[in-house]
Amino acid sequence: MSTLKTLSHTHHWHGRIDAVEGALGTRWHQIMQMPTSDNLNQAIALIGFNCDAGVARNHGRVGAAKGADAVRALLGGMPVHEATRLVDAGNVVCENDDMEAAQATLSASIAELLAQNTFPIAIGGGHEIAYGTFGGLALHLQNKTKPRIGILNLDAHFDLRLNENEQGVFRGHSGTPFRQIAEDCAARDWDFNYCCLGVSRYANTHALFQRANDLNVIYCLDEDMGLLQRAEVLQKVLEFTQSIDYLYLTIDLDVLPASVMPAVSAPAARGVALEIVEAVVDAAIDSGKLLVADLAEFNPTYDIDHQGARVAARLVARLANRMAKQFS
């Protein structure tokens, strides 16, 4: 049975209609489709990850489970440009604390979309979404011999945390996904290629920096990603994408300044300017290797006049429009 057919559809797409403008005035809500066997090829597919379990386990501020539909609400009125094949695949819903089951469902859904030559954009949920998204990409590439997968993470945090209790039992959360992915890669005898941009020295312990170094993580501090350092940042992205064959882009919205993105569990005191984040997104797409992307941590509970939702929607639309050019 198709995993996509089991997903929840809770959002009703609607928005302004500019009938006087004709076809050139079309907006996203007017062309958004449900997934079928005929409309997934070369489509952009949105998939929500309605999960607060990872953030709750990480002792953060919950509410991101409502993030996907809040972003959809702002996307409805988005004008149609390059992306004209849009599909809403629905939401993966985490029941109670069963984060692992939700991640497995997300993985299966992502793999199903990739098999149809679709570009999935997953919207969280906490950053535990990354383990599910990567799992879907791994399923898609499982028959390749040691696929060189690169993970490009825009994030104030490494998310390489340990979380074993006194009995040595591990429970994943929003701060552990890339440590889990590193362990999965080791078990598969795959290289762990991880680049984290926007890291804050004031939000990661020395232990996390040491773990990043031990895992050969490529990273860039937020203080080294100013507007005047754009060229150096993009050169780092270029070198990273040239070293891999398949790319996964993940954006934890707490990489942005709190003044731009207040609607997250852990707002950034400094962060990375939206102009730099968008430039990195463009570079990732222009590599020609990007297969899947996600946005994590958008929490509408703490939004101000839909400011954060507008930023998240802009990033989703930018991904969709630029990826549509890759398909054409």
Image: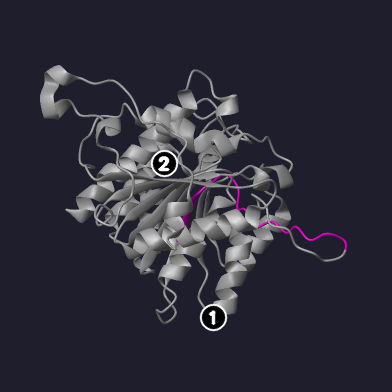
Please tell me whether mark 1 sits on a helix, a strand or a loop: loop
- In the image, the segment drawn in magenta is 151-166
Residue in the foreground of this view, choosing between 244 and 91 = 91
Give the image's coloring scheme.
one colour
Earlier residue among tags 2 and 1: 1
The residue positioned 47% from the left and 68% from the top of the image is 138
- In the drawing, what numbered circle is on residue 277? 2
In the picture, which quadrant includes the N terminus?
bottom left
- Please identify, in this view, whether the residue under mark 2 or under mark 1 is nearer the observer: 1
Q: Position of residue 194 (x, y in %)?
A: 51, 62
Instruction: Say what amino acid the circle numbered 1 marks.
Output: Asp
Which class describes the residues within 10 Å of circle 1: few (<14), some (14-19), or many (20+)? few
Can residue 101 be seen from the camera position used here?
Answer: yes
5 horizontally vs 129: left or right: left
Please tell me whether mark 2 sits on a helix, a strand or a loop: helix
**169 versus 187 height, above or below:** above
320 horizontally vs 146: left or right: left
The residue positioned 41% from the left and 69% from the top of the image is 140
Queried whether the magenta region covers residue 158, the answer comes back as yes
| Quadrant of the image occupied by residue 226 | top left
**257 versus 127 height, above or below:** above
Q: Which residue is mark 1?
A: 189
Which class describes the residues within 10 Å of circle 2: few (<14), some (14-19), or many (20+)? many
The residue positioned 24% from the left and 42% from the top of the image is 83
Q: Position of residue 263 (x, y in %)?
A: 56, 29
Instruction: Say what amino acid the circle numbered 2 marks.
Output: Val
Queried whether the magenta region covers residue 73, the answer comes back as no
